[in-house]
Image (spheres, grey):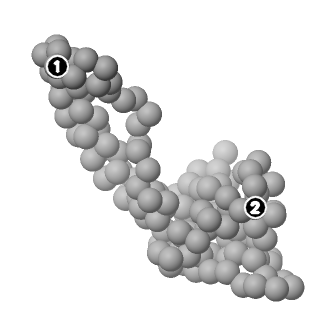
Amino acid sequence: MLHVLIHMDSLDAPATSDTIAAMLNTNPVVVRRTMAGLREQGYVQSGKGHGGGWVLARPLHAITLRDIHHALGDPPVFALGTTDEHADCLIERAVNATLGDAMRAAEALLLERFGQVTLADLAANACGR
């Protein structure tokens, strides 16, 4: 989604859900659902009918990675998870507690860093290579 938003900044016309779906190799319905969350948070706007589509509602420098993460529902940052197969096992509980604490601390640091990186930063990095 991040790369789509950066591309949208350089488009001369609104991006349709079909166009975005092709960029992401997904279904336009998924795009509309995802973009609706971004619209609710004020990052994109949509127009209907002929010539309609999605446009950025803010400049790239005013949107951070954390903003997008939050607008997309604050999905889990890490795919690594703990198990509860042996919930009464003291070792499993200790492992889960330690991993949980470490992942929460790491997630807090990562989200803090996300708040410091704008889409303009990403675009500049892409154009500078």
Q: Is residue 95 visible?
A: no
Q: Secondary structure at mark 1?
A: loop
Q: Which residue is mark 1?
A: 88
Q: Is residue 83 above or below residue 23?
A: above
Quarter containing the N terminus: bottom right
Furthest toward the right, the residue is 50
Q: Is residue 13 above or below residue 82?
A: below
* Other residues around mark 2 within 10 Å, as few (<14) / some (14–19) / many (≥20): some
Q: Secondary structure at mark 2?
A: helix
Q: Amino acid at mark 2?
A: Pro
Q: Earlier in the sequence, mark 1 or mark 2?
A: 2
* 92 lies left or right of 2: left
**Dot label at residue 28:** 2
Residue shown at 78%/71% (left/top)? 16
Q: Amino acid at mark 1?
A: Asp
Residue shown at 76%/67% (left/top)? 17
Query: Residue 96 location, x and y as percent?
Result: 23, 25
Quarter containing the C terminus: top right
* Other residues around mark 1 within 10 Å, as few (<14) / some (14–19) / many (≥20): few
Q: Is residue 99 visible?
A: yes
Residue shown at 44%/34% (left/top)? 79
Query: Residue 124 location, x and y as percent?
Result: 59, 57
